[in-house]
Image: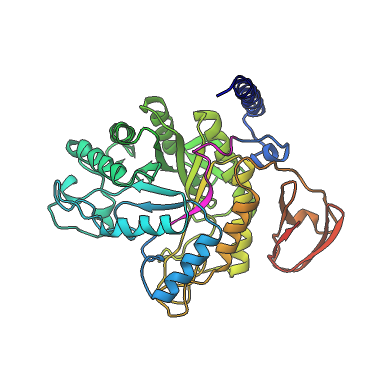
């Protein structure tokens, strides 16, 4: 590095420090205005650093690595056209047991998923969950029941799970981002009615050390705890982290704060959650306003941990008794999802993964592409269009601004703007009219409109 380059680097570092201090001042009062206000003031995050990947998605049981050859090629073309980060679990959700017996490995499915991510130019991410049966009291046969899959490894096998994580990191040296475990699965302590965050953190620290040993350039994060919300006034474990959207469960806050205090290290903090309450699936004050939770919680996470914030999953549509989300029309679903993504981006979230629904038929609400099991499958669906356009328009580090919105229906619009793009969402199930930056705009029911 030359002398002038060194001076420039020093200046860049100084500016970054000033910006970081300014961000902390903005949040000193608790950032009660939510994430959108912070972005609207044009405060840049550290987009471009390795932890800031932007929006992407998680592969689930049925993905574009299997199915009709033509449909798989079509889906690969969709993914390659606008690459984004892709996440895959090491066991379950489309991947077989990676270590059926001690020292006996089976990476066929995981190899295929990683190959898909590579071939579509994605930034690959692996979630280190779940554990082989022999690590949790079972034998060498895999029990694929949900109860078994969501069982944590026995403490006596924490080191074995960490060793498996190390083998995986060594096998895929181009994978530089690892999430440790999923939603504290198997770590709930029924006797104490709280999360066993001590056990999780012990496992996390062993995995963290092993990943860094195998690849010093890898980034590792946790704890991937669910930020559950209760209805105000009904919360039996109410925390101070709350808003009009509800009250976050204190047990989730305790788990996150313990991990943050006792972790060996972390390159980002990971959570997931929904905008509706756990009790009764209530959306407060309504499905659009409830998405403010994502901005408020993200701001709290930044203030609490000082780490880049990742959302491993986020949900806006309540499930039915069979855990299906089919109650909304696709325009309604897309409109609420777009509003949630505005909140995440406005709060400076580093990375967020959309949990891609899975179907083998043509009927797949919220899916990113049509099922590759169909001969004409693999085509882009509306949610993928939103995800790809949002990723391109509002990638980390984008300068955000507040557009000028007026007219009779202005209160019913949600907007997010950069210097070159304005995203407008109609939150009503009827047409509306408004002005955006001085231009007349008419939007259909629940329409999502991109303006340049």
Q: Is 130 within the magenta?
A: no
Q: Say which quadrant the N terminus sits in.
A: top right
Of residues 98 and 196, the one drawn nearer to the viewer in this rendering:
98
Residue drawn at x 58%, y 54% as measured from the top left: 283
Location of residue 409 in the rendering, given as x and y in whole percent from the top left corner: 80, 59
Is residue 181 placed above or below 266 in the rendered structure?
A: below
Q: Quadrant of residue 173?
A: top left
Looking at the image, residue 432 sits to the left or right of residue 307; the answer is right
- Residue 83 falls left or right of residue 19: left
74 vs 182, nearest the viewer:
74
Which residue is at the far front?
A: 2
**Residue 17 in the image, given as x and y percentages of width and height:** 61, 23
Is residue 325 in sight in this rendering?
A: no
* Foreground pick, 418 / 200: 418
Q: Residue furthest bottom?
A: 375
Queried whether the magenta region covers residue 52, the answer comes back as yes
Vertical order, 208 against 373 (above or below): above
Where is residue 282? Give x, y as percent. Answer: 54, 55
Q: Is residue 284 left or right of residue 172?
A: right
The chief SS type of the magenta part is loop
The count of marks equals 0
Q: How is the image coloured?
A: rainbow
Q: Nearer the viewer, residue 13 or 193?
A: 13
Q: Is residue 179 visible?
A: yes
The residue segment tinted magenta is: 46-59
Left or right: where does residue 37 sit relative to residue 379? Answer: right
Residue 38 locus on image (x, y percent): 68, 37
Quadrant of the drawing holding the C terminus: bottom right
Query: Dividing the picture into quarters, in which one does residue 336 lie?
Result: bottom right
């Amino acid at each position: 590095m030359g002398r002038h380059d060194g001076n420039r680097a020093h200046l860049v570092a100084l500016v970054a420090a000033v910006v970081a201090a300014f961000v902390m001042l903005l949040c000193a009062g608790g950032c009660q205005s939510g994430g959108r206000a912070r972005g609207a003031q044009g405060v840049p995050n550290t987009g471009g650093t390795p932890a800031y990947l932007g929006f992407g998605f998680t592969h689930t049981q049925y993905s574009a690595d299997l199915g009709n050859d033509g449909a798989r090629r079509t889906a690969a073309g969709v993914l390659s056209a606008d690459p984004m980060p892709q996440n895959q679990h090491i066991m379950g959700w489309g991947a077989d047991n990676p270590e059926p017996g001690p020292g006996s490995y089976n990476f066929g499915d995981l190899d295929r998923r990683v190959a898909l991510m590579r071939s579509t130019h994605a930034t690959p991410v692996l979630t280190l969950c779940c554990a082989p049966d022999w690590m949790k009291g079972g034998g060498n046969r895999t029990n694929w029941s949900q109860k078994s899959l969501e069982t944590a490894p026995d403490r006596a096998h924490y080191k074995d799970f960490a060793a498996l994580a190390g083998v995986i990191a060594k096998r895929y040296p181009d994978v530089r981002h690892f999430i440790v475990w999923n939603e504290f699965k198997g770590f709930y302590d029924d006797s104490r009615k709280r999360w066993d965050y001590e056990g999780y953190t012990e496992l996390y620290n062993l995995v963290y050390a092993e990943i860094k040993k195998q690849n010093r350039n890898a980034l590792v994060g946790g704890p991937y705890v669910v930020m559950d919300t209760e209805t105000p006034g009904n919360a039996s474990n109410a925390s101070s982290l709350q808003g009009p959207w509800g009250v976050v469960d204190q047990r989730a806050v305790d788990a996150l704060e313990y991990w943050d205090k006792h972790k060996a290290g972390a390159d980002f903090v990971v959570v997931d959650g929904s905008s509706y309450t756990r009790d009764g699936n209530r959306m407060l004050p309504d499905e659009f306003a409830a998405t403010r939770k994502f901005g408020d919680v993200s701001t709290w996470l930044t203030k609490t941990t000082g780490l880049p914030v990742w959302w491993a999953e986020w949900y806006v549509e309540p499930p039915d008794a069979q855990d299906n989300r089919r109650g909304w029309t696709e325009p309604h679903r897309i409109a609420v999802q777009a509003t949630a993504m505005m909140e995440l981006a406005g709060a400076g979230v580093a990375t967020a993964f959309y949990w891609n629904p899975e179907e083998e038929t043509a009927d797949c609400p919220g899916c990113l592409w049509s099922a590759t099991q169909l001969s004409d499958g693999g085509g882009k669906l509306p949610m993928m269009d939103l995800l790809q356009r949002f990723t391109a328009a509002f990638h980390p580090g984008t300068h955000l601004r507040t557009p000028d919105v007026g007219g009779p229906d202005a209160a019913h619009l949600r907007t997010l703007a950069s210097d070159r793009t304005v995203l407008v969402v109609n939150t009503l199930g009827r047409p509306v009219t408004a002005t955006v930056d001085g231009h007349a705009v008419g939007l259909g029911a629940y329409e999502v409109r991109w303006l340049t």
